[in-house]
Amino acid sequence: GQQVMQIPQYQHVQEGEDFTTYCNSSTTLSNIQWYKQRPGGHPVFLIQLVKSGEVKKQKRLTFQFGEAKKNSSLHITATQTTDVGTYFCASAGFQKLVFGTGTRLLVSP
Amino acid sequence: EPEVTQTPSHQVTQMGQEVILRCVPISNHLYFYWYRQILGQKVEFLVSFYNNEISEKSEIFDDQFSVERPDGSNFTLKIRSTKLEDSAMYFCASRAATSTDTQYFGPGTRLTVL
């Protein structure tokens, strides 16, 4: 079945540093969604990308969908302690989400 | 803002016992899902439900699992005979109408099987 991998598995940064997580799929994606899960919390939808090469921004977060629609990235500029959590990409099919392996972000003040 | 709710927040049970996890999806949503997340791992799809029947299920969703929408508001996941490896966080999610609509997740039920 489809596999969605993310790297790195874990990243620890100092507040103010940038952070990037990469998402790679074994198959071409119709779309990609990004979720944030705070420690002890549930996945919260951040954004959906649909078009090849699409770039979307939400304040300090920049999301990109690869030209071949097999990869995506999330970049956070100048991290804050509130950015702590695990970031998951997910392939959104009609019947289900296939989540990536996640990147856990820790931000030290 | 409407939200998905789940009860209980934490369930402890003995191996071999039956458990029912409950969810109240967002009221105008038509598609319902169960996912699970073993501690420290990724979120895994279990089952999707639409129009009072299962649309798709994963390999994890074997004969020990069942889902039901017993009334107009609740959506339940039953595990007939729990195993130690069923210990996980179980998330319910719901979605409105189209394929591009977002899935909204509930806060989850932490199931601990002893």
Image: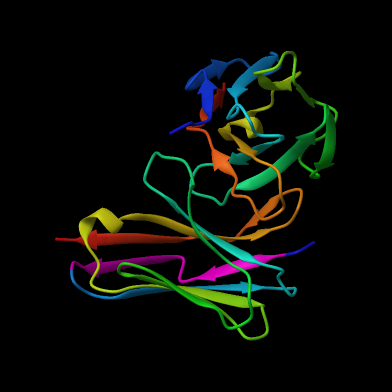
Q: Is residue A9 magenta?
A: yes
Q: Is residue A4 magenta?
A: yes
Nearest the camera: B37 or B82?
Answer: B37
Residue drawn where x is 30% and y is 69% of the image = A60
Q: Quadrant of the N terminus of chain A?
A: bottom right
> Where residue B55 appears, x then y in whole percent?
84, 40
Choose between A94 and B68: the one closer to the eye: A94
The relative height of residue A29 versus residue A88 in the rendered view (above or below) is below
Quadrant of the frame with the C terminus of chain A = bottom left
**Location of residue B30 in the rendering, given as x and y in whole percent from the top left corner:** 71, 34
Q: Is residue B21 left or right of residue A41?
A: right
Q: Quadrant of residue A27?
A: bottom right
Q: Is residue A10 left or right of residue A55?
A: left
Q: Position of residue B5 (x, y in %)?
A: 51, 25
Q: Residue at x 18, y 71 (%)?
A: A16
Span highlighted in magenta in the image: A3-15
Q: In screen coordinates, is A11 left or right of A88?
A: left
Q: Using the image as rendered, state which of residue A65 and residue B72 is in the foreground.
A: B72
Point 75% across, 64% down: residue: A2
User: Which of the 4 quarters of the picture holds residue B28?
Assistant: top right
Total labels drawn: 0
Taking the view exactly as shown, the residue that stands out farthest to the bottom is A67
- Residue B96 placement: quadrant: top right
Give coordinates of residue A97: x percent, y percent. Answer: 67, 52
